[in-house]
Amino acid sequence: MAQRRQITGFSNPTVKFLRSLREKKHRKAAGKFLAEGLRLLTDARECGHLPETLVMATGREPHPLLDRLEADVQASGGDLIECDTEILAKITGKDNPQAVAAVFAEFDTSLASIDCDAAGIWLVAQALRDPGNLGTMLRTGDAVGAGGLILLDDCADPFSVEAVRASMGAVFTQQIAQARWEEFLPWLRAGKGQLVAASLREAVPYRGAPYAAPCFVMVGNESRGLPEAYEAACDLRVTMPMKGRADSLNAAVAAAVLAYEVLDTLG
Amino acid sequence: MAQRRQITGFSNPTVKFLRSLREKKHRKAAGKFLAEGLRLLTDARECGHLPETLVMATGREPHPLLDRLEADVQASGGDLIECDTEILAKITGKDNPQAVAAVFAEFDTSLASIDCDAAGIWLVAQALRDPGNLGTMLRTGDAVGAGGLILLDDCADPFSVEAVRASMGAVFTQQIAQARWEEFLPWLRAGKGQLVAASLREAVPYRGAPYAAPCFVMVGNESRGLPEAYEAACDLRVTMPMKGRADSLNAAVAAAVLAYEVLDTLG
């Protein structure tokens, strides 16, 4: 079996480093992020993402998928660490941590890395502040077979522990790009992408609207929604029924209801 | 204008009491909960829910809706309090608190309070642990014109600050009931409610499935999904396309995609 380092102290520099990755500035400085859970790490492995460091709880249940992961990490020159659950809880910030956590190098999130013809649906989030919403959008994107998620302007960090957790592994299956609107729009217009948003202005019913691939489903900030200019630049504005007092849905919910409608049209 | 008490100290007993309502045990002991924000409190007022206590930031912007709220709270014998934003931040646990917060008496959440023929759609959550998901389901329920949300087994508290916040006021427009499955199922079967869940077992496509009012859309716990027996008891099991690696959606997202499909069928 693979060779593992034992870590027993909270003040160990590796523990300190791993913990520091829960903060954005340290993630950005290191270019690395944390993910946890055997299922998620197995999804990552099967999508070609091996962690640089694998941290396992002493006294964990043995599992063939974990053996496989360990072997692959070792073969690729990665670091294998064992520590008790208290230290693992400290690293992940969770009272009942999963038996395994890992450190990955952040991916390339430039717009240039996206081939918009690679999928029929793409999700776009503008100034989304809640990492849970962002992770949920990644998860939804995976479910509808989207190519990925494009983050416009100042969004939450897709590599935060909360976003990675909420994505349920989709952070590894979906492409992620980060761009300013001023950069995104010309990029989109250079291709044949259709930009769609829910809107209250000059919109058609979302059900049966003329969606076309590659379709970019865009939602805006949780409090402010999309800037008017962004809505105006859309190829298609759609409305969803609002039967109650509210005039909007949660951003991740709106993206999902729209994306499933687009999926039904495009197949 | 209305008479207001000024509170200047963090150690004031009222401040301590208000803060304590962020914890479930104190909410249950007092039978009260916190809500914040002028828009949400106005929604509450317009739905017939006046707070027992209204807390306003000194130096807030004047607003006719706040004047109206203040007058109504005073007329109903409620308590009006003014304090600075630091204290308000302490009470709501938010760094940038809204200019107004309030205390409401918790509602009757017995199943007996629900008239299932009052709406064509009802949402049902089983052992949902995330108060944000729960609040999001309330918000979605409002949007699709649902009658309310039924919480089965051990769910997060719908009166938690996080759930109330995520509901965007729908906690006041949607009926809420809490029940064990053993109590819910006979109640449902005594009426003509149709129980629907997403499932991987013997299910029909969710799109165009034979939904019938009153339709109860049920989702399960974030990690475990619905117990098999609960799925088996459903009148209709539906599948949603899962094009990627994941085999499930976020619970609040699944509820929303299904609920919008039901809305399209039932109108």
Image (cartoon, coloured by chain):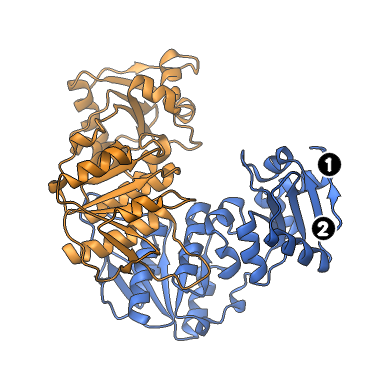
Chain colours: A blue, B orange
Q: Position of residue A74 (x, y in %)?
A: 82, 64
Q: Position of residue A27 (x, y in %)?
A: 70, 54
Amino acid on which disc 1 is placed? Asn
Residue at the spot x=37%, y=49% of the render? Answer: B136
User: In the visual, does A13 lie left or right of B115?
Assistant: right
Helix, strand or loop under label 1:
loop
Q: Is residue A191 visible?
A: yes
User: In the visual, does A225 lie left or right of B190?
Assistant: right
User: In the visual, does B129 lie left or right of A98?
Assistant: left
In front here: A187 or B152?
Answer: B152
Q: Which chain contains the residue that carries disc 1?
A: A
Residue at the spot x=61%, y=53% of the render? Answer: A160
Q: Which chain contains the residue that carries disc 2?
A: A
Tag count in the figure? 2
| Quadrant of the snapshot with the N terminus of chain B | top left
For the residue carrying disc 2, how many other residues have a C-alpha within 10 Å: few (<14), some (14-19), or many (20+)? some
Q: Position of residue B89 (x, y in %)?
A: 47, 31
Q: Which numbered disc, 1 or 2, marks the residue that appears first in the sequence?
A: 1
Task: Choose mark 1 or mark 2, whichever is in front.
Answer: 2
Q: CA distance from mark 1 to mark 2?
A: 15 Å
Helix, strand or loop under label 2:
strand
Quadrant of the rendered structure where residue A29 is?
A: bottom right
Q: Which mark is drawn over residue A79? A: 2
- Give the residue number, with chain letter if any, for mark 1: A12
Both labels 1 and 2 in a single chain: yes
Q: Position of residue B247 (x, y in %)?
A: 48, 64
Looking at this rendering, what residue extends furthest in the left direction? B117
